[in-house]
Image (tube, rainbow, N blue to C red):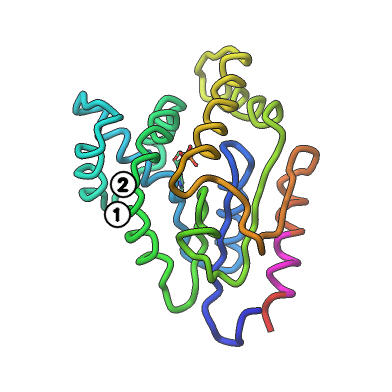
């Protein structure tokens, strides 16, 4: 329950291509809240390391890259490549990287009027006290199909089977890591978008948020 006039902090988690990013943007626009896609922070670390030719398994170099991340300078289009997402899930296993990025993300979340954050560990680690949490999911096949369509739509080429294998491997890495694995918070509302349009998911989310506000 959100106390009248208290911050409307909304935590959204889920695997790659589940629809959580789109849902987060719709919710932020509807309630006029600032939004942080925390995946971009891990992507920015990965991209800085790739650009510098650094080994993604090098925890010290990844920590230095994480310290240099400026939330205000994250550029979605420059970080959107499929390969950057893959690299991001490799740097995201380093606890020191997570500690630095989580600190920056909590700074963003602490806005007086509230905010929307989406990622993998928002409801469990970054904002465990968020009054409204969603866990958005969909089958690996549906998520791979979305990612594949998106790549083709943007003029790229990709094999569906390769994308599906990437989705499954990324899930295993994100759900299986020791520090902050991807999992639903105990008090998260589950939204399975496998057979649900984004509009229907948004309607369901809005009704949950409106009921939580007093
Ligand atoms: O959501 P997105 O695909 O941009 O995230 C890229 C990767 O960053 C994820 O696969 C995950 O490994 C990592 N990540 C994370 N914690 C978050 C957000 C993203 O570990 N809160």
Image coordinates for residue 115, horizontal then vertical, percent: 49, 67
Whole-number angstrom distance, CA of label 2 to CA of label 1: 5 Å
Q: Quadrant of the N terminus?
A: bottom right
Q: Which residue is rendered at x = 42% and y = 73% of the image? A: 111
Image coordinates for residue 150, horizontal then vertical, percent: 58, 28
Q: Residue 53 lies in magenta, yes or no?
A: no
Q: Residue lying farthest bottom? A: 4
Q: Which residue is rendered at x = 55% and y = 45% of the image? A: 182
Tell me which segment is drawn in magenta.
Answer: 205-211
In the image, is the residue at mark 1 within 8 Å of ligand 1 by its beta carbon?
no
Image coordinates for residue 32, horizontal then vertical, percent: 54, 68
- Checking the image for residue 118, the label placed there is none
Q: Residues within 10 Å of mark 1 (few under 14, many from 20)?
A: some
Looking at this view, is 196 or 137 the one in front?
137
Q: Residues within 10 Å of mark 2 (few under 14, many from 20)?
A: many
Secondary-structure class at tag 1 = helix
- Checking the image for residue 97, the label placed there is 2
Q: Is residue 142 left or right of residue 130?
A: right
147 up-or-down from 25: above or below: above
Q: Is residue 21 left or right of residue 186?
A: left
Q: Is residue 144 left or right of residue 195?
A: left
Image coordinates for residue 123, horizontal then vertical, percent: 55, 60
Secondary-structure class at tag 2 = helix
Q: Quadrant of the C terminus?
A: bottom right
Q: Which residue is rendered at x = 38% and y = 36% of the image? A: 79
Q: Residue lying farthest front? A: 178
Q: How many marks overall? A: 2
Q: Which residue is rendered at x = 51% and y = 19% of the image? A: 155
Which residue is label 1 attached to?
A: 100
Q: Are marks 2 and 1 in contact (CB under 8 Å)?
A: yes
Q: Main secondary structure of the magenta part?
A: helix
In the image, is the residue at mark 2 within 8 Å of ligand 1 by its beta carbon?
no
């Amino acid at each position: 329950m959100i106390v009248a006039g208290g911050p409307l902090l909304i935590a959204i988690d889920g695997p790659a291509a589940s629809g959580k990013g789109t849902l987060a943007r719709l919710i932020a626009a509807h309630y006029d809240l600032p939004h942080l896609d925390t995946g971009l922070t891990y992507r920015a670390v990965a991209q800085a390391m790739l650009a510098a030719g650094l080994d993604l398994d090098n925890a010290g170099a990844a920590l230095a890259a994480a310290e240099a991340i400026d939330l205000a300078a994250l550029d979605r289009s420059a970080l959107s490549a499929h390969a950057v997402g893959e690299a991001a899930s490799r740097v995201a296993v380093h606890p020191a990287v997570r500690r630095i990025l989580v600190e920056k993300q909590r700074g963003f979340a602490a806005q007086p009027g509230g905010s929307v954050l989406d990622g993998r560990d928002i409801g469990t680690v970054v904002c465990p006290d968020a009054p409204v949490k969603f866990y958005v999911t969909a089958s690996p096949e549906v998520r791979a199909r979305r990612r594949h369509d998106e790549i083709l739509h943007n003029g790229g080429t990709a094999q569906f089977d390769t994308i599906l294998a990437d989705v499954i491997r990324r899930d295993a890495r994100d759900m299986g890591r020791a520090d902050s694995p991807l999992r639903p918070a105990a008090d998260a509302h589950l939204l399975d978008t496998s057979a649900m349009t984004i509009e229907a998911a948004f309607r369901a989310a809005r009704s949950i948020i409106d009921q939580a506000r007093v």
